[in-house]
Amino acid sequence: MRQTFLFLLLLLSTFNLSAQKSLLQSGPMLGYTDMFETMLWAQTKSEAKVQVAYWQKGKPTERHLTNTVKTQKTEGFTAHLLADEVQPGNWYEYELRINDQPVKLDYPTEFQTQTLWQWRTDPPTFRMAVGSCAYVNEEVYDRPGQPYGGDYQIFTSIHKQRPDLMIWLGDNTYLREPDWNTRTGFLHRNTHTRSLPELQALLASTHHYAIWDDHDYGPNDSDGSFIHKELSTEVFKDFWANPTYGLPGMGGITSYFQWADVDVFMLDDRYFRTPNERKFGEKTLLGKEQIDWLINALSNSKAPFKLIATGGQVLTTFVGNETYTNLCPEERLHLLKLIEEEGIKNVVFLTGDRHHTELCQIKNEAGNMMYDLTVSPLTSGVHTGDEQNLLRVDGTLVQKKNFAILEFSGPKQARVMKITIFDSDGKEQWSKNIQSE
């Protein structure tokens, strides 16, 4: 009788585990992390109670719990879960729970907190993945003909690199015609992309930060006139877990974070821009207020590398498509001149959009080098045309699906950023070291 009871108990437990896993739509995903807190994210298929249990690696008996979230349809059944009983410089294992039952996953679930290195040691070495333009096919809503997306194994290749964090440089999903006029459409598209099986292991063990570009903001080439830009902002907040969204009182998704000794400025190149085809009046891409904030923040930064993430290319001299040079040359020159006049060193723009990868560099009149690393695409179509870009570093043009790994290392006074570009199968395409000035 006892054996029968134990068997039924085991059977019921197995059924519960399976039932809760079947409620999981996508994730868990790691969002921002700092010294005293980490944000986690998950999505269910229907209304459910979600929570995360976590413990310092190697100490499974000392468990902590995040807040509990009851997922809602209007938010795409997403949950933001705060782990705030952590200490700096530690690794934590975690367990997702749906309706009070643990969800068994086939890959490790771990997160880290940032290290308190200041006044104690040299900054830690860390590795950052970078990419843009992730199109996931859905035939019924795609344009007829050859599928635009593919090579989804790129996310497995990124995961194999075990980066500490990943920055998504926009076009992180591609809204289609049925999507961009309703909340239902926005939620559908973001859910469809986030649920890609090849993406799940990467989401669960690398910390993710994101900006947007036109395709995950609204229609192609969309701008500040997009009538649903507040809806777009709400859904972006639902699906990403950045530390902040937008400058005070301004709207949009501008943000900032620091990892070790590197400062990352995350810009919004859609919410404030004027239409590309506007013929009269002042044209803007980033807007005066956002540029003023950026220059102030850069001037205050002591970081050996100042990374500026924005959707479109900044330094390229190619006059075409949605490059800064083509759309807003006056604002571009104004921004670069301010950086020069303020004597701001070690500026690296991280950009996407263009469906090819290249590194641009220029020395301004103050004698400081500036760089623009464009990394695109992850899974969408590839641009194979030949563009005239006078600032491109020889040998850095890649016209296939690819991603970047940036490694920051070295002592405090001599930090080095190593850029390595990999194709979708994880094969190295090129590598370059940049020394901080």
Image (cartoon, grey):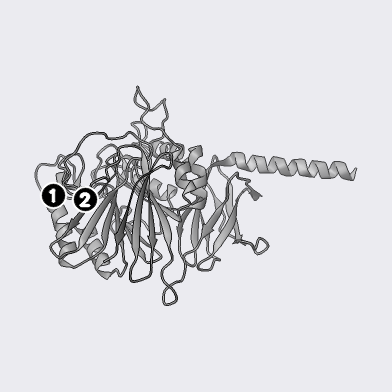
Return the mark for residue 314: 2
Under mark 2, the amino acid is Val
Under mark 1, the amino acid is Pro
The residue nearer to you, when weighing 289 against 367, is: 367
Residue behind mark 1: 329
Mark 1 vs mark 2: which is more N-terminal? 2
Report which quarter residue 412 is drawn in: bottom left
Please indicate, yes or no, whether residue 225 appears anywhere in the rendered image.
yes
Report which quarter residue 179 is drawn in: top left
Q: In the figure, is residue 388 to the left or right of 375?
A: left
Report which quarter residue 400 is drawn in: top left
Q: Secondary structure at mark 2?
A: loop
The 10 Å Cα crowd at callout 2, few under 14, some 14 to 19, many 20 or more, is many
Q: In the figure, is residue 122 to the left or right of 41?
A: left
Name the residue located 33 percent from the left edge and 33 percent from the top edge.
381
Considering every residue shown, the one lying at the far bottom of the view is 119
* Number of numbered labels in the structure image: 2
CA–CA distance in space, label 1 to label 2? 10 Å
Q: Position of residue 20 (x, y in %)?
A: 63, 43
Q: Secondary structure at mark 1?
A: helix
The 10 Å Cα crowd at callout 1, few under 14, some 14 to 19, many 20 or more, is some
